[in-house]
């Protein structure tokens, strides 16, 4: 059975060219006619179109790429970049939350603690992982693992990929807002190097609950926002179709976030997005993580905490209105 191909609206011209390319290749095989010249011409055209499309994506289109079902998830990167990942379970209060995973691993020969939000690939796994939306026990598990990392001097690497924390009644009953707030406070004071990377969606406090780190990295086609574009559009215009306008106004894309100082580095993606070449994307991420880890390891604990404090104390851009005198 042929696996269905997921095509975004702006990718449809590329899909048509790809179909033509497949047909030409099949025709060449069936008729034993040399069509190498024609095939090469379409390949060149596809390459040029792909570069043009992906170098001019709007913020809303980048949100769509960040949600692509074939986009690599946290575990894909962990499996490619780390060795001996040993998952640790449970928050020691309620249960194990599969939307937020974590455990020890070796990265470039050094022990680290992994904390990551994980979506599911197929319907069964998506339900099990609650579509990557952690509940309070997920954030409490994350904090337990970060405190364990602090105890043994392990750097913490967090992978952000969630539309937001789960907003259901049971989640609220177990105090999800409090769990996230405690994480924000404790991560600010964690006495070990911390790095977070937005690999897909970075939605609201659900993302921030594991994102108060010394360095924040983001993939080129990921987004990081206080609210989803659809949620913002529903509030401001009472119309979810205004999401593209909201995405532009929210400055959710990586390039905007870097200019505003919200993220420290934008990790380039392979042509056509990370889902088109997972190994290339993982290689770029590995290089960035190693570079920032080396910088952070060179700092003593007090300098590390002072630098982290200054980062968040001066985060953001604002203007003060002048005093109006009568």
Image (tube, grey):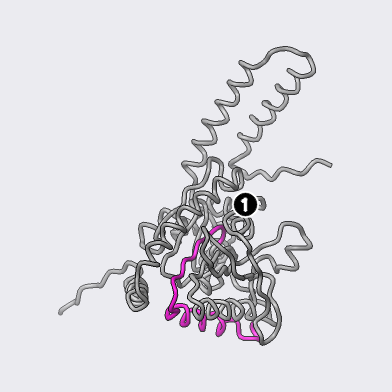
Is 197 contained in the magenta span?
yes
Q: Quadrant of the N terminus?
A: top right
Secondary structure under the numbered disc 1 in the rendered image: loop
Q: Is residue 324 above or below residue 253?
A: below
Relative image position of residue 282 (x, y in whole percent): 55, 51
Residue situated furthest left in the rendering: 326
**Image point 45% across, 60% down: which residue?**
217
Q: Residues within 10 Å of mark 1 (few under 14, many from 20)?
A: some
**Image point 66% across, 43% down: which residue?**
7
Q: Quadrant of the C terminus?
A: bottom left
Relative image position of residue 162 (x, y in whole percent): 59, 65
- Towards the viewer: 85 or 257: 85
* Figure quadrant of residue 310: bottom left
Is 136 contained in the magenta span?
no
Task: Indicate left or right for 241 with 188 as reference.
Answer: right
Residue situated furthest front in the rendering: 109
Task: Indicate left or right for 217 with 165 as reference.
Answer: left
- Towards the viewer: 155 or 246: 155
**Image point 69% across, 45% down: which residue?**
6
- Towards the viewer: 26 or 194: 194
Q: Is residue 219 above or below residue 297?
A: above
Task: Indicate left or right for 143 with 86 as reference.
Answer: left
User: Which span is picked out in magenta?
Assistant: 172-201
Residue situated furthest right in the rendering: 1
The residue under label 1 is: 71
Q: Is residue 278 above or below residue 18?
A: below
* Figure quadrant of residue 82: bottom right
Relative image position of residue 254 (x, y in whole percent): 45, 55
**Image point 50% across, 72% down: which residue?**
154
């Amino acid at each position: 059975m042929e696996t269905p191909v997921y095509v975004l609206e702006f990718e449809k011209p590329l899909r048509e060219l790809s179909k033509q390319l497949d047909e030409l290749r099949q025709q060449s095989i069936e008729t034993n006619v040399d069509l190498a010249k024609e095939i090469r011409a379409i390949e060149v055209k596809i390459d040029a179109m792909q570069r043009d499309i992906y170098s001019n994506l709007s913020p809303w289109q980048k949100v769509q790429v960040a949600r692509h079902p074939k986009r690599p998830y946290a575990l894909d990167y962990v499996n490619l970049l780390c060795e001996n990942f040993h998952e640790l379970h449970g928050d020691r209060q309620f249960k194990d939350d599969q939307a937020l995973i974590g455990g020890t691993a070796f990265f470039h020969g050094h022990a680290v603690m992994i904390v990551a939000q994980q979506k599911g690939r197929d319907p069964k796994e998506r339900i099990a992982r609650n579509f990557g939306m952690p509940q309070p026990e997920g954030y409490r598990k994350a904090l337990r693992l970060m405190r364990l990392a602090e105890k043994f001097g392990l750097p913490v690497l967090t992978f952000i990929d969630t539309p937001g924390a789960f907003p259901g009644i049971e989640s609220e009953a177990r105090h999800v807002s409090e769990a996230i707030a405690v994480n924000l406070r404790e991560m600010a004071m964690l006495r070990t190097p911390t790095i977070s990377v937005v690999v897909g969606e970075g939605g609201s406090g659900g993302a921030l609950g594991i994102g108060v780190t010394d360095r924040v990295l983001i993939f080129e086609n990921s987004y990081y926002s206080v609210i989803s574009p659809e949620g913002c559009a529903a509030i401001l215009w009472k119309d979810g179709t205004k999401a593209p306008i909201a995405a532009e106004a929210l400055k959710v894309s990586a390039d905007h976030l870097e200019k505003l100082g919200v993220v420290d580095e934008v990790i380039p993606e392979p042509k056509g997005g990370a889902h088109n070449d997972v190994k290339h994307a993982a290689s770029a991420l590995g290089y960035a993580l190693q570079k920032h880890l080396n910088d952070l390891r060179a700092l003593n604990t007090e300098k590390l905490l002072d630098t982290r404090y200054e980062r968040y104390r001066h985060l953001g851009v604002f203007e003060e209105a002048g005093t109006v005198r009568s």
